[in-house]
Amino acid sequence: MSPENVWNVWNRILRASPWEIVWGLLSSPVVCAALGIALALVVVRVRRGSSTGRSVLRGERVAVGAIALVVGVVWVVDIALRGYVLDMSATVSWWRFAVAPIAAAAGMAVWGVLLRTKAPRRTVDATSAARRTWTTFGSRRGIRILVALMLVTSCIVVVFGQMSTALDPGVAAHVALDVPNVEAPPIVTVFPGWAYGIPLLAGVVALAAAVVFALHRNAVRPFSDRVRLDLERSGRSDAARDVVTLALGVVLIALGGLLHMARSGAVTTMIVVTDSGAEARHDVSLPHADLILAGGFVAPFLQIAGCVLLALLVVHAIGLVRARPRRSASPVEVPV
């Protein structure tokens, strides 16, 4: 960021109202990430006292927390490079909304591939041989919320893509807004069109496939012969909830960024100065104006919620690593 830009930003801050300053801060993904981490620490402190060292499948849950950390770091580094290090103002950064879902999908795919039953397998009986699917463990409600959120994100991507305009061949990253009853060319602004939406759709599809694969692997692998069946079922449910929580956080972050960019590029009014110097205000024809304006309002809160979910996974994984349960008292290795 050049010194001139810093000076302009400082002057705008001095002239802005407290509400404009707060809203300007919330428009920054970095601020949303910081608020999400702070809220997650508050939640952890309020819930302090819950046992983490007695959790079954500690290694698998720590790995999910590590994936959440990597996804968060990759997302913030991408924002920092695009916004503060590199001058990409004239570049269509098509990956900006897809980077977090794709990183999470890759991490979950590796997590599912590496799942193993380390101890000897349990002897097959009626309980352990029951058919298990990717929805057997974890929260059914969480899975339904994730599916609904992915569908909403996909629909919004399609709506924004239909609204977008391609200034260059094959690059639909703008929107052309007409001004009714005014002899003026359309207003063209940057908009999350197909150039941003198609990579995000690919990321959401990859994330959905990775979630199903990870939950399937978590469910169908054999039970351990050294762990009580009820405890291992509980541990697998915890691991499945962590996987769904990670996916929810990632989709919330991507959707919040998409809605914020759409609101930033939306224009609802235009002031025209006549030859006599008089100013006339005209309404701009903005398709789906209610959706865009409402989305711009909830966008920072979606990103904060997503960051809270990722931060909770990371903090919980750190708690599992630091916990030192006594092996003689741990229920994880109670023989059957």
Image: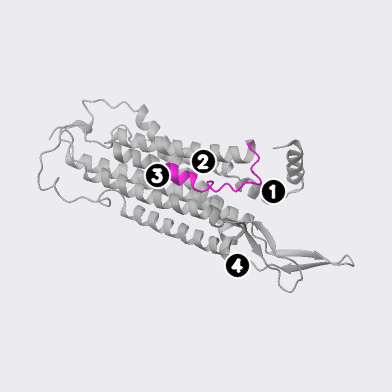
Give me the residue at 55% from left, 53% from top: 195
The C terminus sits in image quarter: top left
Number of labels in the image equals: 4
Measure the alpha-carbon separation of dots 4 and 3: 33 Å
Measure the alpha-carbon separation of dots 3 and 2: 14 Å
Q: Are marks 4 and 3 in contact (CB under 8 Å)?
A: no
Task: Answer whether residue 44 is visible to the viewer in this image.
Answer: no
Q: Earlier in the sequence, mark 2 or mark 1?
A: 1
Instruction: State the residue position of label 1.
Output: 18
Q: Are marks 4 and 1 in contact (CB under 8 Å)?
A: no
Q: Nearer the viewer, mark 3 or mark 2?
A: 3
Q: Nearer the viewer, residue 2 or 147?
A: 2
Q: Is residue 145 above or below residue 33?
A: below
Q: Horizontally, is 335 left or right of 138 in the view?
A: left
Q: Earlier in the sequence, mark 4 or mark 2?
A: 2
Circle on res. 105: 3
Q: Which residues are magenta?
A: 86-105
Label 1: element kind: helix
Q: Are marks 3 and 2 in contact (CB under 8 Å)?
A: no
Q: How is the image coloured?
A: one colour
Q: Nearer the viewer, residue 24 or 171?
A: 171
Give me the residue at 15% from left, 50% from top: 130
Q: Horizontally, is 329 left or right of 62 in the view?
A: left
Give me the residue at 63% from left, 37% from top: 86
Q: Residues within 10 Å of mark 2 (few under 14, many from 20)?
A: many
Q: Is residue 184 above or below residue 335?
A: below
Instruction: State the residue position of label 2.
Output: 75
Residue 256 percent across, percent down from the top left: 53, 52
Task: Say which amino acid is labelled 2.
Answer: Trp
Q: Nearer the viewer, residue 166 or 112?
A: 166
Q: Residues within 10 Å of mark 4 (few under 14, many from 20)?
A: some
